[in-house]
Amino acid sequence: MTHRPFVRREILVGAGLLAAFPAAAQVAPAPPKPPVYVAIDTPQGRIVIALAVAQAPITTANFLRYVDRKLYDKATFFRASRAPGAVDYGLIQGGLQNVGALPPVAHEPTSQTGLKHVDGTVSIARTAPGTATSDFFICIGDAPYLDANPAATGDNLGFAAFGRVVQGMDVAKKILALPTPGKAINPVMKGQILDPPVPITSARRVPAPAGPDVTAPPKL
């Protein structure tokens, strides 16, 4: 009977130690993943983009599948959509146009990632949510109408932004200004198809560039 208080103290001390263990075992949160940079080379020049791997992991991983397998070396910029009466506002679209595309990936709306369609944003093309494959586009000028809008009716999930041009916006604008007399398979793209298209000669991972054109990969 005399040993019970001691046992009780041991239990209490043990419980206190156990309670302390989780706090002692806590580790500092992992630092945010740095952006991955990809250089897209064309006859018009080079475009370097920073991929927002931390904010849009699914979409950036999908894009890098094509980069790392060198599949974009067979792709083109095939579309230049200019706003009526504008020469430096719109978007250019590139990719494989579903020829040899890999399986589609889940949709990451901007309401989830926190990214926005601002000037220089790179985003993935899609039809219905979850159909995105190889095709991507670059915004020339702010395009908030491409963001997800939960208050809108119908398909209000917008497009999945996943990066931003950090060098070569002048090249993107050159492509935007090229003639677009090509035949559009999709009526929505009538008057927007480049002819000839601009070949993508290579798309490769590159080190972080330096220079006045570089912007820190933001929460786009």
Image (tube, rainbow, N blue to C red):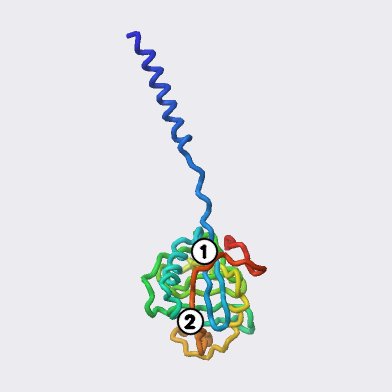
Q: Which residue is mark 2?
A: 76
The C terminus, quarter of image: bottom right
Who comes first in sequence, dot 2 or dot 1? 1
Q: Which quarter of the image is occupied by the N terminus?
A: top left
The furthest residue to the right: 212
Q: Residues within 10 Å of mark 2 (few under 14, many from 20)?
A: many
Indicate the amino acid at tag 2.
Answer: Thr
Pointers 2 and 1 in contact (C-beta within 8 Å): no
Q: Which mark identifies residue 172?
A: none
> Looking at the rendering, which quadrant does residue 207 occupy?
bottom right
Q: Is residue 128 visible?
A: no
The alpha-carbon separation of the residues under discs 2 and 1 comes to 22 Å
Q: Nearer the viewer, residue 172 or 204?
A: 204
State the residue at coordinates (35%, 8%).
2
Amino acid type at mark 1: Val
User: In this figure, which residue is indicated by the disc labeled 1?
Assistant: 36
- Residue 160 lies, in percent from the top left, at 49, 67
Is residue 180 visible from the viewing direction of this image?
A: yes
Q: Is residue 75 left or right of residue 87?
A: left
Q: Residue at x 51, y 89 (%)?
A: 196
Residue 181 percent across, percent down from the top left = 53, 91
